[in-house]
Amino acid sequence: MPGSCAGISRHIPFLRSQLLLACAIFTLITALLAGWITYRHGFDGAIWLFPMLAVGFSFFVWQHARKPLETVERMEEVLRDSRKGQLHKRITDTAGLGELGRTAWEFNEFLDLIEMYFKEVNTCFKLVAESVFHRKALSHGLPGQFAESLDKINLAIMAMEENSQWISRNELASQLHSLNTSNLLRKLKLNQQDLVSISKEMDEVEAIASANREGAESSLTGVGHISDALTGMNRRVQEMAQAAQALGSESAAIDTAVHIISEIADQTNLLALNAAIEAARAGESGRGFSVVADEVRKLAERTKAATSDIDAIIGRFRRQVDVMVEETATATAVTADANRQMHDFRTRFAEFAKAAESTIEKVSRTKDRSFGSLVKMDHVIFMQNAYAGVEKASDCDEARAAQTDHKNCRLGKWYFEGIGKAQFGDTRAFERLGTSHADVHAGVHRALALSREDWANHAELRQQLVQEMERAEKASSQVVDLVNAMVAEKYEGAKGTMPMEAVQ
């Protein structure tokens, strides 16, 4: 048994020591008193009865006081163990101790309440750690602040349940978002590659259409020359037909003249024959006239023979002229039909050239619109990379992709180094596109920088991060509107058709 206590009772003996000391002093005083009386008055057995009674009384007191003292020591031991967290020990064997026994039982009941309280708390929080929230702390039967504390713990458990559900939903949403983002980025990149391929193919189609247009224009010029040549040929063939017809008419006149000459020869021959007959009748005097008549007859016969030959030649010539006139008429019809067909072909070729021009315009517009779609896709992918980089807050692939500045991305290179200025430099939307595009990258870069700070514990940083992403989204929407307005302004020639948010 310890002989001293700590703190303010450091120099005061415990109750057991005090009782033992009191019994010893009482017995010693009684013995000293009996010895002093014996010394003064002589020995008397009755006097020494008192020391013996004192010893017996002290022993009786000690025996009866030991149980309460042991109970007090037991209470101290239980309190010491309770302080160490051992709440299962109790104070027993307190019968006949009166107030001390009642105090011990009250102490036991207090320990029962504490043990029950902590068992409820431990049971609830053990189940909470296992994500079981339906088992609440049972406050019924506990008094006062014990019940109030358990009720508040139940409120805390319900809050933990809601928080756990929110965490579960957030975890599920985060996993789904991560899955969606990864697949979305992959699909968007595939679409981006498709748009890049389409844009390149549209460039090739535009080049082919331009070559076709140039070929059509050149062919149209050649067709015009051929048409002009056929027109001249048709005119000359018609002139030849007219000349052949005139020649046919002249040959008919020659034929008539030959017939007249033949008739004159016949009449001359007849007159010569009559003259010969008359000379024969005259006799010797008409011999000279007969010779002349004979020569005239011979001349008439030769004229007749010559006219026959001329008539045959004229006949053959006339037949050739008739064939030539017929062939010339056929050639005239053929050249007229060829000229008409060439005119129709020239008209169709002009329509083809016009269609080629329209095709080039539509292909060019489609190419520019596909480039606009590619720009939109680039911005969607860029913003998705930005969100992923902000969410991961690390040097990931998405963050590195979002760190690209506004001069080295696809749109930036097209704007500063490519053909953008040559094709769209005259539009107002092109002038404003550079500023909005730079704002997109600047907002994302500031958001990425804030994501690497301790935003989880600073609401102000979180608010700034969200604001920067909102600015980037707004600027991205302006870029999309400006690209649409730029294409519309180029082909429609109406600057007033741009969206108000793009021009203001």
Image (tube, rainbow, N blue to C red):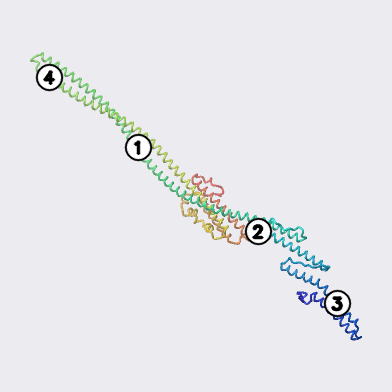
Q: Which residue is mark 4?
A: 294
Secondary structure category for the residue under label 2: loop
Q: Nearer the viewer, residue 70 or 157?
A: 70
Kind of residue at disc 3: Gly
Q: Is residue 194 left or right of residue 140?
A: left
Dot 2 or dot 3, earlier in sequence: 3
Q: Residue at x 71, y 57 (%)?
A: 136
In this picture, residue 166 sits left or right of residue 495: right
Task: Report which residue position mark 2 lands on.
Answer: 130
Instruction: Name the residue: 35% across, 34% down.
Output: 339
**Label 2 sits on what residue type?**
Glu
Residue 425 shows up from this direction: no
- Pinpoint residue 25: horizontal percent, then vertical percent: 84, 79
How many angstroms separate mark 4 from mark 3 (CA)? 226 Å
Q: Residues within 10 Å of mark 3 (few under 14, many from 20)?
A: few
Quadrant for the N terminus, please.
Answer: bottom right
As drawn, the label of residue 56 is 3
Work out whether mark 4 precedes mark 1 in sequence or the reverse, and give the earlier one: 1
Q: Which mark is residue 446?
A: none
Q: Mark 4 touching mark 1, by CB under 8 A?
A: no
SS at mark 3? helix
Q: Is residue 213 above or below residue 33?
A: above
Asked whether, in this view, residue 43 is left or right of residue 266, the answer is right
The kind of residue tagged 1 is: Asp
Spatial separation of the CA atoms under disc 2 and disc 3: 65 Å
Is label 4 in contact with label 2 (beta carbons under 8 Å)? no
For marks 3 and 1, give the CA distance. Answer: 162 Å
Q: From the viewer's perspective, is residue 360 above or below residue 257?
A: below
Where is residue 211, by image quadrant? top left
Q: Which residue is mark 1?
A: 228
